[in-house]
Amino acid sequence: MFGLVRSIGAGFIGFLESAGEIVFLLLDTLRCMVRYPWRFTHVIFQVHRVGATSVFVVMTTGAFTGAVFATQMHYQLKPLGMATAVGPVVAVSMFRELGPVLAALMVAGRVGSSLAAELATMKITEQLDALRALAVYPTEYLIVPRVLALLISMPVLVALTITCGILAGYYVAVPLLQVDGTYYLDNMYKFTNYRDVLTGLIKGIIFGFIIAVISCYKGLSTSAGAEGVGRATTEAVVNSSMVVLVSNFFISYFLNLIMPATS
Amino acid sequence: MQKPPILRLRGVHKSLRGQHVLRGVDLDIADGENMVIIGRSGGGKSVLLRHIMGLLKPDKGEVWFRDQNLVQMSEEAITPLRREMGMLFQNGALFDSMTVGDNVGFSLVEQGKMKPAEIRTEVARALKIVDLPGQEYKMPAEISGGMRKRVALARAAITRPALMMYDEPTAGLDPIMADSITKLIARLGKELNMTNIVVTHDMVSAYEMADRIAMLHEGKIYAIATAKEIETSDDPVIKRFVKGMSQVSDAVF
């Protein structure tokens, strides 16, 4: 009994410790962003690495989610005589929830793991110490370009996911399930507005930040050995995905207060 | 006449993973001196070097580089000071995503004072000094351990730091290569007027390089003396180490 309490307590303290360290890393990163000139070539290289190579993955994810969502919605709404409502339903949910969350989960899996593995390997092979020994501050050299790259890439990837989802939804509903295309589009335009677009992009930026900071933290805080690298990689993906999903609720709640979904 | 010390350690204590590795290290290193630190594996020699670089902070004690106490400085404040120091890591710690040439020229690029063409010339010159001419475009994974060490040496020394630290520069090298590295370190020290701190348990190279030898034993500096004095010492601890004699209690099997 006492052992159980102790292990729960230790887990809780560990959680608080890493939460605190993540906050420190975050503040340090923000400070370095302001304090040092940006390394544009590094940022571009990272944008290519984390953003450009994720394009195909998020487009596929968005397209098939949009397609299956349109199909299911059509079966639900057609008996009610509201088949053309599939358009706005797909569009609004893609913009507000599915687009940003799905893109973030895919990026967390692809990019979060590779960031964590890279930094963890650099740490255990003493490359981080070598960097410090060569008078370069690791946060400024390694973390800032990676965080910036995700901040730049994520809104674009989210936009691509949304676009593919809406297009796929249209091509499933209109040609395949024979919904009236004109009303489909008309309803979609009527019920979707700039606030939905903005919500998606804001979420994209926040999720990009979350994935970058958590994955970098996991990489930097790895313990020795190949096993440590493996653990850092797994934890980067799992933790950033969970934080994305949990924070999504609170961000939605907050954004709905200032930018309600209904027009 | 004694020059003022470039480095002073006072009562440095450090525990790592529950082990009390350094138990009050006091050490003065004079400007331009070649100091060799010997001691048993796992005895905290590398840890000591990391304290001098400010890569680790002591639990207790002071580390003075010139007139600044590194212990009280933030990581960011120490960073520019490290331009005056160089360190050769045990396994080289080359950046494996960069070519050999980019590794060697790293500090010059970071300092941003030289044009790319000048940096290329300087890198070529540095690689020639460590006997690796024309290897700029190889990746660290493509070269041998000994070569990696020499590349790392070129990378650390290219900015001509005032204080160079070497963590087991000859470990894992064949005797001929070890000797050439030893000579190289001694030559660089003399030509560039650097202070050298070399951690090693290779006594042959220790005798060759050292102005003074410090022995780290049980977390403290057990003895500091000239190479000659260490070689001929009658102290049982020193004698056992330099002659490489184990006791029954040291047996590992």
Image (cartoon, coloured by chain):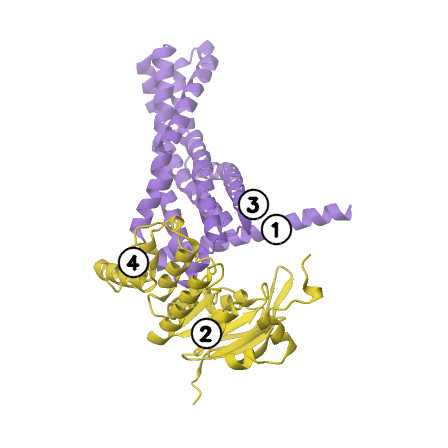
Image marks 2 and 1: residues in contact by CB distance under 8 Å: no
**Number of residues whose C-alpha sits closer than 10 Å to that of mark 1, classed few (under 14), some (14–19) or many (20 or more):** few
Q: Colour of chain A?
A: purple
Q: Inspect this view and state whether residue A31 appears.
A: no
Badge 2 is on which residue? B208
Q: Amino acid at mark 2?
A: Glu
Q: Quadrant of the C terminus of chain A?
A: top left
* In this rendering, position of residue B176 left or right of residue B106: right
The chain identifier of the residue carrying mark 1 reads A
| Residue B133 marker | 4
How far across and down, in percent of the image, does residue A72 sit? 46, 16
| Residue A14 marker | 1
Badge 3 is on which residue? A227
Q: How many marks?
A: 4
| Spatial separation of the CA atoms under disc 2 and disc 4 | 26 Å
* In this rendering, position of residue A109 left or right of residue B124: right
